[in-house]
C-alpha cells in the first residue's frame, strides 16, 4: 500500500469513529453462548412480571432465575441479585426491566456475566445522578399516580392500569397491580459505583409507547452504551405485552440465535 493510501485509510478510520460507525470493544465480539439467565424486575413489580418470558427461555433450554428484588434500597437489591448470580454454574446473561437496570449496571461487572439486557430500563453511569438526567426528558404521566406511605411508594390503580401497564390486557394488568411490590421512595436516588455496560456487551429494548420512562431517554441510554437495540410497539411492560420479542432479544444475548 502506498503512503497516500495509508494516510487516506487512517483518515477514513478516524472520520468513521467520530460519527459512531466503529463499534466499541464491548460489542465487537459475537455473543457468548450461555445457558444461564438471571432476570431482575423493577419498581412496583415482583418476579412474576417475567412470567410470560420465562417459559419461552426455558423452552430454548436455558436455566432461568428471577430475582425477588426487595426494592428497599439499591444495596439490598444488589445483594439479592449477587446471591442469585453466585448460584449460577457458569456464564450468565443479566436482564433487567425498568429500575432493575440500575442493579445490573452495578452487578454486571461480575466475571460470570457475559452480557446485559435492558428492557425499557435505567442504565446509569457510575456515580451518575440519574434523576437529573431523566429530568432532561419529558416526565411520563405515570408519575402523577405515585403514592407515598411511610417512606414507600405504590402506584394508584388508575395510573398503573392506564400508564404503567398500557398495552397489557385488563385482567393481566389488574393482577400485576395487585402484586406490585412497595418501593422505597429513596430507591430512585441511589447511585451506582460501576457501569457494567461500559465493559460488557449490551442489548436494549425501547418501548415506543412508554409512559413511565420517556422513550427518547431509553434511546439515549441505548445509544450511549452502544447496545444492540430493538424498538417495540409497547408500553412500559413490554416483557408482558411483547414477551415473545423480549425473549428473542434475551436469546440473542445468550448466543442462542441472531
Image (spheres, rainbow, N blue to C red):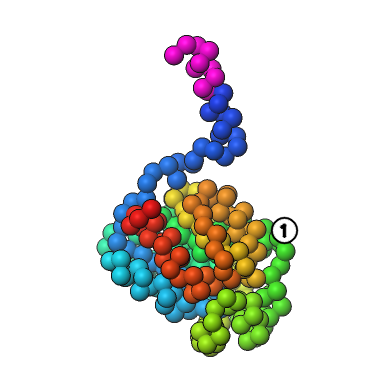
User: In front: 195, or 134?
Assistant: 134
Between 202 and 256, the residue placed more toward the observer is: 256
Of the pair 203 and 167, the residue shown nearer to us: 167
Please provide percent x and percent y for residue 184. 59, 77
In the image: residue 99, left or right of residue 110: right
Category of crowding for the residue at label 1, using alpha-carbon neighbours closer than 10 angstroms: few (below 14), some (14–19), many (at least 20): few
- Main SS, magenta region, reads helix
Residue 114 is at least partly visible in this image: no
In this view, 189 is above or below 7: below
Q: Residue at x 54, y 38 (%)?
A: 21
Residue positioned 62% across, 68% down in the render: 210
Q: Quadrant of the N terminus?
A: top left
Count how many numbered circles sit on residues in the image.
1
Residue 9 within the segment the image draws in magenta: yes
- SS type, badge 1: loop
Q: Residue at x 38, y 66 (%)?
A: 38
Q: Could you say which is closer to the camera, residue 103 or residue 221?
A: 221
The image position of residue 211, as x and y in percent, is 65, 71
Left or right, residue 33 beside residue 196: left
Q: Quadrant of residue 62?
A: bottom left
- Which segment is the magenta one? 1-10
Residue 2: x percent and y percent?
47, 11
Q: Which residue is mark 1?
A: 136
Q: Is residue 43 left or right of residue 111?
A: right
Against 179, residue 213 (above or below) is above
- The answer to whether 6 appears left or right of 15 in the picture is left
Amino acid at each position: 500500500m502506498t503512503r497516500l493510501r495509508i494516510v487516506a485509510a487512517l483518515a477514513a478510520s478516524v472520520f468513521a469513529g467520530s460519527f459512531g460507525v466503529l463499534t466499541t470493544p464491548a460489542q465487537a465480539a459475537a455473543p457468548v453462548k450461555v445457558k444461564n439467565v438471571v432476570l431482575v424486575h423493577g419498581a412496583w413489580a415482583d418476579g412474576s412480571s417475567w412470567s410470560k418470558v420465562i417459559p419461552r427461555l426455558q423452552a430454548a433450554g436455558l436455566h432461568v432465575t428471577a430475582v425477588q428484588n426487595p426494592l428497599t434500597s439499591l444495596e439490598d437489591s444488589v445483594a439479592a441479585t449477587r446471591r442469585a448470580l453466585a448460584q449460577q454454574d457458569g456464564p450468565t446473561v443479566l436482564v433487567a426491566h425498568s429500575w432493575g437496570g440500575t442493579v445490573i449496571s452495578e452487578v454486571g461487572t461480575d466475571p460470570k456475566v457475559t452480557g446485559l439486557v435492558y428492557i425499557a430500563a435505567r442504565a446509569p453511569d457510575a456515580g451518575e445522578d440519574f434523576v437529573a438526567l431523566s429530568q432532561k426528558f419529558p416526565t411520563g404521566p405515570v408519575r402523577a399516580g405515585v403514592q407515598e406511605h411511610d417512606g414507600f411508594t405504590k402506584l394508584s390503580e388508575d395510573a398503573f392500569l392506564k400508564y404503567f401497564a398500557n398495552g397489557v390486557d385488563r385482567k393481566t394488568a389488574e393482577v400485576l397491580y395487585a402484586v406490585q411490590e412497595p418501593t422505597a421512595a429513596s430507591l430512585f436516588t441511589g447511585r451506582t459505583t460501576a457501569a457494567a455496560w461500559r465493559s460488557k456487551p449490551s442489548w436494549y429494548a425501547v418501548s415506543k409507547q412508554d409512559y413511565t420512562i420517556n422513550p427518547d431517554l431509553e434511546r439515549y441510554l441505548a445509544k450511549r452504551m452502544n447496545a444492540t437495540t430493538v424498538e417495540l410497539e409497547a408500553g412500559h411492560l413490554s416483557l408482558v405485552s411483547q414477551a415473545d420479542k423480549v425473549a428473542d432479544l434475551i436469546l440473542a444475548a445468550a448466543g442462542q440465535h441472531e
